[in-house]
Amino acid sequence: MLRIVCGLVGAPDEATDPQLACRARDLTVSWLRWGYFGDILEDSNIDALLARAVQRGYDYCLVQGWGHILAEHASPNGGQSHSFFEALPDWIAGARFCLAGVADRCLLADLAAWQALGRPCSTNFPITDFGPELSGYLIDLKPDLSAGGPFLRSLDELCEKAARGVFVLNYEPYGDVEETPANFHAPLSALYSVAAGFKPNRILQTHGFDTHTRMVFFDYSRQALAFRRLLHEEWDGRDYPRFLQSAFPRMAEAGTHYYLWPGASAERMDWQEMERLWAAELSRWGGAQAFADHWSRYRELWHEYVLLNILSEQQRLLEAIDDQAGSVIWWSNAFCTVYSATHYSLEQKRQIYEQWARSIANKAPRLFLYGSDHSNSSVNGIAAGEYWDRYSAQGGDPLLGRSFHRGQIRF
């Protein structure tokens, strides 16, 4: 496992509009947080950052300038997903370098080599090219966002799709919910959940539920809630790809956007790939019969559907939450998405998240939490009251890594 720390180098040109520069910095950090969860060092000088990384005992340091983006290509859990940090270990294993990347914008330092060479100044030292293995993940918007036109326009499109989006399968893994916390007492009294894939069902299965369990779905996508209702009311829990073939055209008039794998859409589907993904899902449950049995029990539960944006309408969800033992909430990465990064600054995201965490701790301190915070650090297996106490003690600096979880997962 790479012992790597990420750094942020600022001090843009004084002529740069401060608002644009701050926006560039926020975007760099937001995109970095989808693949990196540790501390982010910040300085106005690359060499000072490298020295700090050495002092902390890291082997590598990745330094980005404000406005530099690490892109990611995502797919459902079990599909073809690629990120810069997944590709990086193989590239390092096959390369010999001291500094690699793009001068002043994205530099990877082998800190042992840097020290052995006498800590050379990064401004006049030869830089090894990343090559095609890593360059495809790099997007440079520039510190004043002058090169950000296409990228920023794409964010508006992604946000518009998200507001009518449906996850037919989960992009995130189930590792955080497979074992119940030691102090959790089954069965579930209530599960409050975003309307995405089958992770809500996996939480029900692993945490235990009975006929009295209350199921509350909340989402800002009207289509996501409609799809969950359709599943609950009409699907028998068998042959999911076949059900999707009938559901896709039925929801077409609602303008539904489906989150699938790159290049796929409801109109242009590789059904063999969907069959493969569904088979992978069933294997996590112990086979088709095990899932069908679960689904039959699940359909008997009381369901509620709440349309809201958790970033701006928290009160309506808080009113739906009861302070009961055996209750769980899963919000996935709602506070650290393309949507939140597009509409809010790092500090605004932090304030919104802290309002949320404080409110649920006050309203339902026994509620067990699953999701990620405003910096995409996992939150799992911990009750709301304890979590807020520990979070408050450390503080919510967006550049700090946090470990209030049993295990970190990638969202």
Image (spheres, helix red, strand yellow):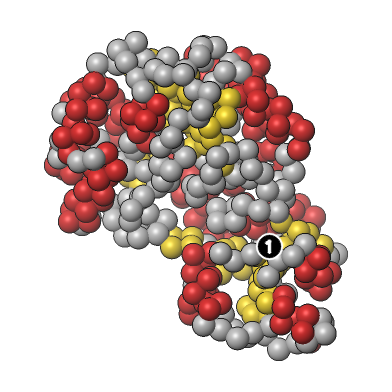
**Image location (x, y in percent) of residue 246:** 15, 38
- Return the residue nearer the eye: 274 or 151: 274
Question: Against 262, is 379 above or below?
Answer: above
Residue 180 seen anywhere in this rendered image of the structure: yes
Crowd band around label 1 with a 10 angstrom C-alpha radius: few (<14), some (14–19), many (20+): many
Q: Is residue 159 above or below residue 46?
A: above
SS type, badge 1: strand
The number of callouts visible is 1
Is 298 situated above or below 30?
Answer: above
**Residue at image x 70%, y 53%?**
39
The image shows residue 65 at horizontal and vertical percentages of 71, 66
Direction front: furthest residue: 182
Q: Residue at x 59, y 66 (%)?
A: 2
| Residue in view at x 49 percent, y 74 percent | 90
**In the image, is 15 to the left or to the right of 247?**
right
Compared to residue 299, the image places residue 273 above or below, namely below
Quadrant of the drawing holding the N terminus: bottom right
Q: Compare residues 347 and 178 and report the one nearer the observer.
A: 178
Residue 36: quadrant of the picture: bottom right
Q: Is residue 15 visible?
A: no
Q: Position of residue 346 (x, y in %)?
A: 69, 45
For disc 1, the marked residue is 5
Q: Residue at x 36, y 15 (%)?
A: 213
- In the picture, residue 402 is in which quadrant? top right
